Image (tube, grey):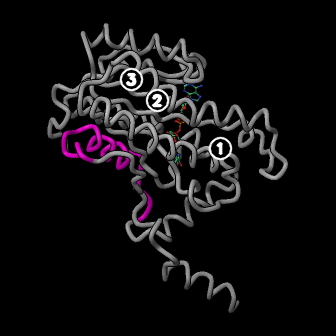
Amino acid sequence: MANQLLKGKKGIIFGALDERSIAWKTALAAVAEGAEIVLTNAPIALRMGKINELAKLCNCQVIPADATSMADVDALMQKSMEIFGGKFDFILHSIGMSPNVRKAIPYTDTSYENFLKTVDISALSFHRVLQSAMKNDVLNEWGSVLALSYIAAQRTFPGYNDMADTKALLESIARSFGYYYGFAKKVRVNTISQSPTVTTAGSGVSGFDVFLDYAEKMSPLGNASAEDCANYCIMFFSDYTRMVTMQNLFHDGGFSNTGVSSLLFEELYKNVNE
Ligand SMILES: NC(=O)c1ccc[n+]([C@@H]2O[C@H](COP(=O)([O-])OP(=O)(O)OC[C@H]3O[C@@H](n4cnc5c(N)ncnc54)[C@H](O)[C@@H]3O)[C@@H](O)[C@H]2O)c1
């Protein structure tokens, strides 16, 4: 499928933990499309995950950075400029973690300490990355910055917990920062709202298998896979989406615009009659 859509482009990819990660698939797709990349993840993920295997496959360097540390993110930007020999073109923010979700603490009984961590790791980190990119002037004009979201930002999905509010903030940051970065440097900023996908972060949500099955049956095209999501990211790093910014783009097989599917309707009807 590779068409060298990213030939000559360079970028940073956050969040590849293992081969199931959306960032992992995106890194492979970006390199197959001709891009040069730098991989990054939190220091603990570097120790526990498989990112060094991916770096070999992508022939690239890994720079540790905790996305909640401004110093780490600034150092990452500067080091990436050194590696690339100048400015670059795209950034993928593929980061999500909620201690409340991890510890199965109910939303209505939240730990605010955990909530603040969720927001810092999963949403403010996007602002931090954008702020550092702009301040260090690392992106070429018509560059593209993407983060990954989920429809729970707009509609309630019990179990998604404080990640729902956090994704709403993430999408808002794309709109707000996109305005400033667009006028200042012609850089575009968007979020992609992805179908439920079997990954470490995804599977941590309570009742995830039900989410997955429900979404599969509700979506006319079925759930979008991590590979599909990677391809969509590639399009957003390419010049084919130069004029798209400040958007949240649903990549969900039609789920977000479906009220009910006959598949689910028939299943519920059968259950009622049995
Ligand atoms: N899997 C799904 O169902 C799904 C659906 C929609 C959106 N998303 C979003 O996609 C993105 C990627 O998640 P994934 O599903 O590929 O799971 P994943 O677990 O493979 O990736 C999450 C990544 O976040 C990184 N991370 C956590 N804390 C960090 C920190 N302090 N600094 C830097 N990195 C940190 C982890 O190390 C990991 O690599 C997340 O934003 C997630 O919310 C996932």
Q: Dividing the picture into quarters, in which one does residue 184 lie?
A: top left
CA neighbours of label 2 inside 10 A, class few (<14), some (14 to 19), many (20+): many
Q: Quadrant of ligand 1?
A: top right
State yes or no: residue 226 in magenta: yes
Q: Label 3 belongs to which residue?
A: 134
Look at the image and give the residue range highlighted in magenta.
222-243
Mark 2 CB near ligand 1 (8 Å cut): yes
In the rendered image, residue 271, in percent from the top left (x then y), is placed at: 67, 84
Depth order, front residue of 148/126: 126
- For the residues bearing labels 3 and 2, Cβ distance under 8 angstroms: no
Q: Residue at x 57, y 44 (%)?
A: 169
Q: Secondary structure at mark 2?
A: loop
**C-alpha distance separating marks 1 and 2:** 16 Å
CA neighbours of label 3 inside 10 A, class few (<14), some (14 to 19), many (20+): some
In the rendered image, residue 141, in percent from the top left (x then y), is placed at: 23, 29
Dot 1 or dot 3: first in sequence order is 3
Q: Label 2 belongs to which residue?
A: 16
Q: Secondary structure at mark 3?
A: helix
For residue 102, the mark is: none
Dot 3 or dot 2: first in sequence order is 2
In the rendered image, residue 152, in percent from the top left (x then y), is placed at: 59, 56
For residue 204, the mark is: 1
Q: Residue at x 16, y 29 (%)?
A: 7
Q: Dividing the picture into quarters, in which one does residue 23 lie?
A: top left
In the rendered image, residue 122, in percent from the top left (x then y), is placed at: 58, 36
**C-alpha distance separating marks 3 and 2:** 23 Å
CA neighbours of label 1 inside 10 A, class few (<14), some (14 to 19), many (20+): some
Q: How many marks can you see?
A: 3
- As drawn, the residue found furthest toward the bottom would be 273
Mark 3 CB near ligand 1 (8 Å cut): no
Depth order, front residue of 44/133: 133
- For the residues bearing labels 1 and 2, Cβ distance under 8 angstroms: no
